[in-house]
Image (cartoon, rainbow, N blue to C red):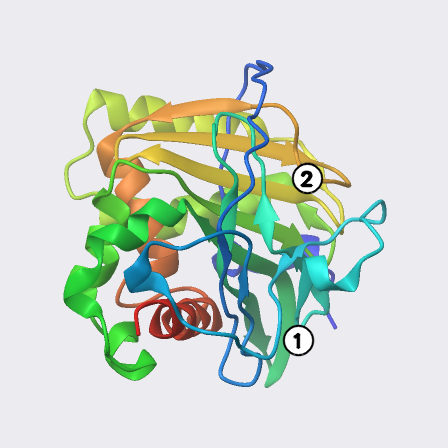
Amino acid sequence: MAAVGSMPSSLWISVSAPTKSKITSCNVKPRFSLPLSKTHSYFTIFSTFPSHFSLGSLDARLPGLFSPRAASSSSEYVEEPTTNVKFQRSLSLPGCCTSLSLLGTGYREKVFAIIGVKVYAAGLYVNESILNKLDAWRGRSAAELQNDSPLFETIFKAPLEKSLSIVLVRDVDGKTFWDALDEAISPRIKSPSADDETALSTFRTIFQGRPLKKGTFIVLTWVDPTKMLVCVSSDATPSSIDAKIESANVTSALFDVFLGRNPVSPSLKASVANGLEVVLK
């Protein structure tokens, strides 16, 4: 099997930039945990839902991020079954004043000579208030939700935090990682503005010449539809911000890479649809 660093650049998608600034994250407990898949009906009520969110008692719990230093309680985590990466059910991140809850997980795979190579696992976290904006999709099946572009556009455009947590499952050269990200984002931006070029340059700077080891966390947090925070950590959930990206086109393109019509991780989008089916009943 070829070494990851030598694989074609179409293999990876991600983000970043220079300047490190510490931002203290708020440690507010979320009110819910969401499911990962039809075979893992994860859901836990942490506190009272608004009445229209009452789903009754389900038989399992929810997800969380993997770290060698992770807490001992297995109920705080859900394992992405293909990569065995564990994701926390709720996560406090730099730049967010509320804990975000896991909505689904998946993995990125590239096939070489009929052999599938796993590159990373990913989990989508959301501010629970986003669910208040999704009443129009209540009662729909996961299959319907998965193919509903307006649904995912509504989630993206909501001025509330959502975050993609990526955990590498093999070593990756930073330049290769950036090249793949650029290949995925650039075609989605038809006429890049000066702000778009600056944002892409910021991403490029953080990854160029930087080896990304197995277990590295890359967290992309959409603070609102025009602003995204990028955090990278070699072995644990990041505690500081590496870059701030301010470009509506770039932030939108990146969201589309993972949750648009042709996502790079179909398993992630399917898992998110399953999670939405449960909480929108």
Q: Using the image, determine if residue 160 lies above or below residue 10.
A: above
> x, y (%) of residue 247?
27, 28
> x, y (%) of residue 76?
70, 57
Q: Using the image, determine if residue 15 lies above or below residue 149.
A: above
Q: Using the image, determine if residue 264 lies above or below residue 26.
A: below
Residue drawn at x 60%, y 15% is 22
Q: Is residue 270 left or right of residue 218?
A: left
Figure quadrant of residue 134:
bottom left
Which residue lies under the disc numbered 2?
Answer: 237
Residue drawn at x 56%, y 67% is 107
Q: Amino acid at mark 2?
A: Thr
Residue drawn at x 47%, y 28% is 97
Query: Quick one: SS at disc 2?
Result: loop
Count of numbered labels shown in the rendering: 2
Measured in 3D between alpha carbons, the distance from the residue under mark 1 to the one under mark 2, in whole angstroms, is: 20 Å
Residue drawn at x 35%, y 55% is 257
Q: Using the image, determine if residue 145 lies above or below residue 78.
A: below
> x, y (%) of residue 155?
27, 51
Which residue lies under the disc numbered 1?
Answer: 81
